[in-house]
Image: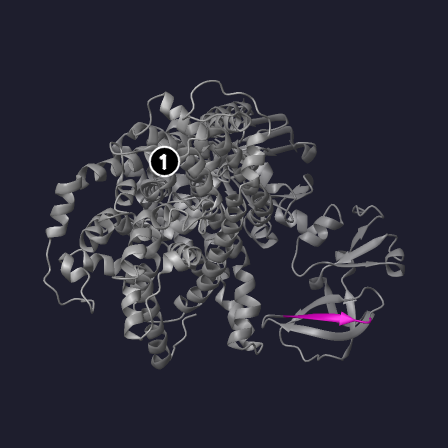
Amino acid sequence: MATQHSRAAARFMIAPSVVLLLAWMLIPLGMTIWFSLLRYNLLMPGDNPFVGFENYSYFLTDPAFQTAIVNTLLLVGGILLITVCGGIGLAVLLDQPMWGTGIVRIMVISPFFVMPTVSALVWKNMFMNPVNGLFAYVAGVLGLPAFDFLTAAPLASIIGIVSWQWLPFATLILLTAMQSLDSEQLEAAEIDGASAWSRFYYIKLPHLARAITVVVLIQTIFLLSIFAEIYVTTAGGPGNASINLTYLVFQESLQRYDVGTASAGGVVAIILANIVAIFLMRMIGKNLDA
Amino acid sequence: MGRITLDKVQKKFGETEVIPPLDLTIEDGEFVVFVGPSGCGKSTLLRLIAGLEDVSGGEIRIDGTNATDLPPAKRRLAMVFQSYALYPHMTVRKNIAFPLKMAGMDEAEKTRRVERAASVLNLADYLDRRPGQLSGGQRQRVAIGRAIVREPAAFLFDEPLSNLDAALRVGMRLEISELHKRLETTMIYVTHDQVEAMTMADKIVVLRAGHIEQVGSPLDLYRTPRNRFVAEFIGSPKMNIVDGEEASRHDAHAIGIRPEHIDVGEGPWEGTVGVSEHLGSDTFFHVHDTGLADVVTVRAPGENSHRAGDRISLSPQMDKLHRFDWEGLRIA
Amino acid sequence: MARAVPNSVKARNTAIAWIIAILIFFPILWTILTSFKTEGAAIADPPVFLFFDWTMENYTTVQERSDYFGHFMNSVIISVGSTVLGLAIAIPAAWAMAFVPGRQTKNVLMWMLSTKMLPPVGVLVPIYLIFRDWGLLDTRVGLVIVLTLINLPIIVWMLYTYFREIPSDILEAARMDGATLQSEVIHVLLPMAVPGIASTLLLNIILAWNEAFWTLNLVAANAAPLTAFIASYSSPEGLFYAKLSAASTMAIAPILIMGWFSQKQLVRGLTFGAVK
């Protein structure tokens, strides 16, 4: 019974959230765009003259920018690939009858609750350290030379660490979706003569499509902005080998105090995120209606 | 007291008119059933009476006073929902007592009424359970209990039995009828099941697309359906409708004859037995190749030796024939 | 599918699942074990697993040297504060959208979700400058404000998902039973909404507790919660494995335990109800 009165009340109740989010979006966004057009460095007091697109040309032609874009996409793509494939595998496994499901679930989900700075530090020092790390010890036992992960393969190492953090999330969501599959469908398929593999491929996997979409969407939102893991492990190095867009903008702003260039970088990051977002929102929008 | 009058009541959702202006009077103490196929507006009509939807025009009077703009709580009506709508976080006792608590009734009276309702509905042993721990039939009884403690002017039931299994449905049907006998309170009952309508109602209101097709007692509707829609909707199995030459011979556009009004044996019609359904007490023959209609359904006594493929003669009881004009209206 | 599975199959599944689960859990387990070792035992070659002299000394050292408890309280204040504030703003909104849906409701929700798409780095500079000018840098209040805003869309969505599941039949029944709007809310809606609100609370505390981007950029020594405090172990203290492990264990333990209890809600919450 939606009367005139209750509609007005509803608008009044929704208003604070909308106003706050609108302010949170528009004010800083406007400022970022404005700053991106100024020559503005916190270390050089004085006027901040309008320079048009100078900051953009500076930022976009910076060789670090290209590296950062490629790395950002590699990070997102690599981690999505590992977590979605691994998540499907683990979900299938955990869906099987076994003893101690509860404890297995708890162990598998745990990495998700570990704060990024802790997981980055633990992996960096206790596992990937070429002298005292556990991996170095294992390599020694196998008679291999110790491998300096964060120097020799910094980006791959970060992909590994972040995948470890997000694999549980993908697994949990895919497992939940898998368990919501009507068992009669599987039994019908079994009677129709479908093998275990066909049942997975023709029934379970299509059923998971929506959940996979959701995993991709949510993770992309977070993975585009990976920061703490890089900050703690490689600080973007060696050189710019493991820098991503977020980290590059962070360097311009809070390390070089170049507000103008950092803002231009911020705008570029927003544009990139929007391109990804438009594509993703279409997917989830469709799925949410279903 | 519970006399409900609808005067040109109308409901629109945006531009679409789901209920065109409609008049109906429900007498005090009557058991009225709204019946019709899904989407016919019967539930909407009930919700208009309940006050859960606002009318777009017209007037609803309860015992003479205009209730059109009263909120649901002020109409002295109680409703049993299809989903039962029990409060999952309250015990059965609290569920039943909720309307009394809302009315600010004192503890002693509240306890007395809840216990009385519980004993009437055989719920005494379950008063401290939660709805989640009850079976479908028990939940249904709790919902009814919550309705009766208020001693309302009328009860509204919105397809209350549709979530129960067949055996339970028959039992609950009887219980609700008995409850009506005992309380003698007006009841309005919505269903799409004509069997429920026929067995329970004092008065049936047949609805189609928001229109009232016919109002009458179950037997009125059975004997003298006002049109083909009512004729075919009431009665099971469905009335046979025959048109063409045979109908013209009776000066009608179409004629209708119920399966139970056709005898097997010497008669003017003839056909081949197709599927026969043996219920024990009765046998239903689906007869083909009669030249009258695709299939003619015939009810015959249970002990019967005809098999699929047999040719049989059929003899309609001419005095039970219904005649309809080209608009589908009954010819008197 | 309540079908009997041969025990051999079940045993094989169990073995594979346990091995993989232990591998995934191992870094956490190793960290917890190392936190009870002496620094020497922590880098022993070959590594020692269980048979070492268990000691609590690392925990006391971490507390004495770097005021672990102070940072812990910062984490508590910031995560609980931002979640409670977020709930206070979001509950009315989610409520209204779930029970008085309008034509724009879906669009408003999608728009809210889209604000999560805004990369934080895109607004890092202005927020940093605003915070600097208003004296909010390195304050708990400042961080509470930011975390409230970034998690608001998730809170609204989660609550909306939960509220929408309360059947409207029940609200109508309450109305028929004579409940006023106020008693409808107190006696029917609120009790049914409490579980949803509780899981939203739990999940958001977890998210806020682990938030790192704004935390690392907007606070220094004073208001630093555990995320930022741990980052200070980056070097050279990171090489003291036992102390690093003790600090890490203390930082993750509360949230790990909370997470174990809320894993079911996590799915519904973080997927905005799209997966059940």
Q: In the rendered image, which residue does mark 1 sit on?
A: C217
**Looking at this view, is A269 or A65 the one in front?**
A65
- Decide: is C234 above or below A138: above
Secondary element at image label 1 = helix
- Horizontal arrangement in the rendering, residue C205 relative to residue B329 (left or right): left
- Decide: is C26 above or below C102: below
The local crowd at label 1, few if under 14, some if 14 to 19, many if 20 or more residues have their Cα within 10 Å, is: some
Q: Which residues are magenta?
A: B283-289
Q: Measured from the top left, where is residue B218 in percent x and y?
A: 62, 48
In the rendered structure, the residue with mark 1 lies on which chain? C
Evaluate whether residue B30 shows in this view.
no
Residue found at x 89% / y 58%: B249
- Horizontal arrangement in the rendering, residue A172 relative to residue C33 (left or right): right
Residue B124 falls inside the magenta stretch: no
**Looking at this view, is C80 or B10 the one in front?**
C80
On the image, which quarter does residue C37 sit in? Answer: bottom left
Residue found at x 29% / y 44%: C231
Residue found at x 47% / y 41%: C169
Residue sitting at the far top: A47
- Horizontal arrangement in the rendering, residue C251 relative to residue A101 (left or right): left
**Looking at this view, is B269 or C187 the one in front?**
C187
Evaluate whether residue B267 shows in this view.
yes
